[in-house]
Image: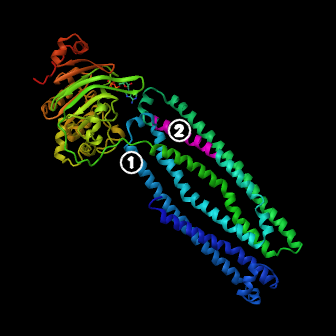
C-alpha cells in the first residue's frame, strides 16, 4: 500500500461522505411524510427537527422543495461514489503495477534451484492472473468492506434511535445470515485454491505445448497433446462449476433471507401502524434504511468470494516473494579478474543421492585453453553451471584468481565469463540487439569484428535487413548453426577473462567450425577458454583435455598424451577418424 495510502484514505472519506448523504434521503422523506402530509401531528425526532426548521404549511404547499433536496443529496452521493471508485481504482492499479514489477524483479534474482522445480506456466499465472485477482479485491472489496461496516455502524444506532422495536425486527434475520457467511468463506476459499492451481496447470500445459510445437508436429503428437490438455481443462471446468454452484446456493439463500427481512419489517410495521404505535413516515424511513443495510448484506456473498479468492492469490504470490534471492551486487565496482581457475575435489548433486560431479579437480591458468570431453550426462554442463554460480557446489573448492568463488560476489563471478550455452537462447529482437547483449556499449565496428570471428558476418549481410533482421521468438528464424554463431559473437563481444563454450559449435559444419577455431586460436593467450565438445577436432587444439565419465575425471593430459594412453579419448579419436576416412588432421595449438 506504500505510496498509495493517501488515495486510499481519500477514497474511504469519499465513501463516508456519500454514505452520509444517502442516509439523509430516508430521513428527509420520512420527515416530509409525517410533518407535511400528516398535518404536523407526527411524533419523532425527525419531525421535531422539521418543526424547528420549516413551516408546516409552507412545506405542504412546496413539496417539490423536499424532492429537490432529495435530488441534491442523491447527486452529491453519486459524485462522492464516483470519486471513491476513481481513487480506489488508481490506488489498486498502482499497487498491482508495483507488485508485478516487484515479482518480476524478484524472479530475476531467484536461484536456479527454484526454477528447476517451478512450472513456467504456473509462474506466469501467479505474476498476472493472481495479481489481477488481488487488484480487483483491493479496488472494490477493500472499499466495499469498509462501506458495509460503516453502513452497519451508522444504520444500527440510527434505527435504534428512531424506533427500538422496529430496529430489533429489522435485524432479526441478518445475524444468522452473517454466521452462514462465515462457513461459506471457508469453503469458497478452499475451492478457489484448487481452482487457481487447476488454472495454473492449464496454463503450464499450453505454455509447454507452444514451446515444443515443432517436436509435437515432428512426432505427430497433436492428438496426444489435445488429450493431455483436455484432462486439466476438464478439471478446471469442474472446479469452476463447483465454485459457481456454491456461490449460487449462497447467493440465493442470502437473497431469500434479505428479502424475507424486508417482508417481515413491512408486515410488522403495518401492524404497528394499524395499532397506532408507528407513523407511516417512520415505516417508510425503516424500509429505506433497511434497504441501505441489506444491500451490503446481499453483496456479502460476492465480497466474501472475492476476499476468499484474493487470500489464495496473496498466498500464491507470497510463495514466490518468500523464496530467498541468490544475492550479488550489480554495481560492485570490482576490477576484472585474470581468469585463473583452480578446482579441487568439487562434488555436487542436483538431488540427494544423485551425484553429478565427484571430486573433480583441474586447473586452467590465465590465457590457457581447457577442453572437456565425456559421454552424455557425465557432468560437463554441470561444471560450467558451477563456474557461473548458477548452483553452488556442496564440497571441495573452486578458486578464481586464488579466491574461493563462494566468497566472491555472485554477479562479479558471472561477469568474468562469456558463455555460449549448449542451447543458445536468442531474444525476439534484431540480430544486432542480440549480439549487443554481450556489451551494450559496443560500437558497430566491434560488433562486425566479433561477427566475423564467429563467421556469421557474411551470412547476416546476405539477409535483406542485414544486422537489423528480426530473429523471432528464441531465434526460430535462424538455423541451429546460425543461432550458435550469433551466440558466439555475443559472447566474444563481452571480452570477459574466461570464454566458456558448452558444445557451442555442435550445429556448425566442420569447415565453418575450423574457420571459427582458427580465429579463436589467434586469441590464444589473451583469454582463458574452457570448451566442451563431442567432436575431438574441436578439442584437440587445447592446452589440456580432461575426459569425464559419470561425474568423475577419468583422463587428463594434452591431445598427444591422451592419444598415446589407452583410454576413452584414444578410442574416440580412432572412431571419429575412421568415420571420416582421410579426415582432417587435428588442429593443435602448434599448427
Ligand atoms: N537441473 C537438474 N536437475 C536434476 N538433475 C540434473 C539437472 N541438470 C542435470 N542433471 C543431471 O546431472 C547429470 C549431469 O548432467 P550434465 O548436463 O552436466 O551432463 P553433460 O555431460 O553436460 O551431458 P551432455 O553432453 O548430454 O550435455 C545428468 O545425470 C543429469 O541428468
Task: Give the side of residue 209 with respect to residue 469, left or right.
Answer: right
SS at badge 2: helix
SS at badge 1: helix
Mark 2: is the Cβ under 8 angstroms from ligand 1? no
How far across and how far down the image is residue 166, in percent?
79, 68
Front: mark 1 or 2: 1
Choose the circle earlier in sequence order: 1 or 2: 1
Q: Main secondary structure of the magenta part?
A: helix
Q: Which is nearer the eye, 457 or 302?
A: 302
Residue 105's label in the rendered image is 1
Q: Which is nearer the eye, 57 or 325?
A: 325
Asked whether the viewer can see residue 207, the reply is: yes
Tell me the CA gap for discs 1 and 2.
25 Å
Asked whether the viewer can see residue 455, the reply is: no
Q: How many marks?
A: 2
How far across and how far down the image is residue 414, in percent?
27, 39
The boundaries of the magenta stretch are: 188-208
Amino acid at each position: 500500500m506504500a505510496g498509495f495510502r493517501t488515495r486510499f484514505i481519500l477514497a474511504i472519506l469519499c465513501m463516508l461522505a456519500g454514505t452520509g448523504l444517502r442516509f439523509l434521503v430516508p430521513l428527509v422523506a420520512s420527515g416530509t411524510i409525517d410533518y407535511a402530509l400528516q398535518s404536523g401531528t407526527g411524533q419523532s425526532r425527525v419531525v421535531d427537527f422539521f418543526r424547528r426548521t420549516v413551516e408546516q404549511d409552507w412545506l405542504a404547499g412546496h413539496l417539490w422543495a423536499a424532492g429537490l433536496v432529495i435530488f441534491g443529496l442523491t447527486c452529491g452521493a453519486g459524485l462522492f461514489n464516483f470519486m471513491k471508485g476513481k481513487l480506489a481504482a488508481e490506488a489498486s492499479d498502482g499497487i498491482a503495477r508495483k507488485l508485478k514489477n516487484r515479482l518480476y524483479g524478484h524472479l530475476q534474482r531467484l536461484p536456479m534451484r527454484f526454477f528447476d522445480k517451478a512450472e513456467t506456466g504456473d509462474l506466469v499465472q501467479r505474476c498476472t492472473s493472481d495479481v489481477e485477482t488481488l487488484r480487483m479485491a483491493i479496488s472494490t472489496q477493500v472499499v466495499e468492506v469498509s462501506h458495509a461496516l460503516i453502513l452497519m455502524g451508522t444504520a444500527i444506532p440510527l434505527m435504534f434511535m428512531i424506533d427500538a422495536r422496529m430496529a430489533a425486527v429489522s435485524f432479526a434475520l441478518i445475524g444468522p445470515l452473517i454466521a452462514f457467511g462465515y462457513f461459506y468463506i471457508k469453503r469458497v476459499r478452499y475451492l478457489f485454491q484448487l481452482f487457481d492451481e487447476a488454472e495454473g496447470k492449464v496454463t503450464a500445459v499450453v505454455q509447454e505445448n507452444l514451446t515444443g510445437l515443432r517436436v509435437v508436429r515432428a512426432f505427430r503428437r497433436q492428438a496426444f497433446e489435445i488429450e493431455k490438455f483436455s484432462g486439466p481443462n476438464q478439471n478446471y471446468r469442474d472446479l469452476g462449476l463447483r465454485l459457481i454452484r456454491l456461490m449460487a446456493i449462497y447467493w440465493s439463500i442470502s437473497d431469500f433471507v434479505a428479502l424475507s427481512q424486508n417482508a417481515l419489517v413491512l408486515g410488522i410495521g403495518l401492524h404497528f401502524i394499524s395499532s397506532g404505535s408507528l407513523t407511516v413516515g417512520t415505516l417508510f424511513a425503516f424500509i429505506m434504511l433497511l434497504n441501505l443495510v441489506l444491500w451490503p448484506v446481499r453483496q456479502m456473498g460476492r465480497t466474501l468470494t472475492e476476499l476468499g479468492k484474493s487470500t489464495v492469490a496473496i498466498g500464491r504470490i507470497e510463495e514466490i516473494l518468500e523464496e530467498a534471492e541468490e544475492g550479488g551486487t550489480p554495481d560492485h565496482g570490482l576490477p576484472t579478474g585474470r581468469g585463473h581457475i583452480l578446482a579441487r575435489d568439487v562434488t555436487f548433486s542436483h538431488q540427494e543421492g544423485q551425484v553429478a560431479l565427484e571430486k573433480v579437480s583441474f586447473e586452467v591458468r590465465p590465457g590457457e585453453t581447457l577442453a572437456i570431453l565425456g559421454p552424455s550426462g557425465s557432468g560437463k554442463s554441470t561444471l560450467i553451471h558451477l563456474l557461473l554460480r548458477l548452483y553452488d557446489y556442496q564440497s571441495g573448492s573452486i578458486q578464481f584468481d586464488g579466491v574461493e568463488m563462494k566468497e566472491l560476489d555472485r554477479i562479479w563471478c558471472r561477469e568474468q565469463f562469456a558463455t555460449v550455452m549448449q542451447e543458445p537462447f536468442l531474444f525476439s529482437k534484431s540480430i544486432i540487439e542480440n549480439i549487443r547483449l554481450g556489451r551494450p556499449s559496443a560500437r558497430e565496428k566491434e560488433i562486425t569484428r566479433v561477427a566475423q570471428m564467429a563467421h556469421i558476418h557474411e551470412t547476416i549481410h546476405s539477409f535483406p535487413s542485414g544486422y537489423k533482421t528480426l530473429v523471432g521468438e528464441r531465434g526460430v528464424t535462424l538455423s541451429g548453426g546460425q543461432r550458435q554463431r550469433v551466440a558466439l559473437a555475443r559472447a566474444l563481444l563481452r571480452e570477459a577473462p574466461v570464454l566458456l563454450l558448452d558444445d557451442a559449435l555442435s550445429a556448425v559444419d566442420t569447415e565453418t567450425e575450423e574457420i571459427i577455431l582458427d580465429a579463436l586460436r589467434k586469441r590464444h593467450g589473451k583469454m582463458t577458454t574452457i570448451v566442451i565438445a563431442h567432436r575431438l577436432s574441436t578439442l584437440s587444439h587445447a592446452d589440456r583435455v580432461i575426459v569425464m565419465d559419470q561425474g568423475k575425471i577419468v583422463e587428463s593430459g594434452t591431445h598427444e598424451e591422451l592419444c598415446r594412453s589407452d583410454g576413452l579419448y584414444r578410442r574416440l579419436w580412432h572412431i571419429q577418424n575412421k568415420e571420416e576416412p582421410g579426415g582432417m588432421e587435428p588442429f593443435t595449438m602448434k599448427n
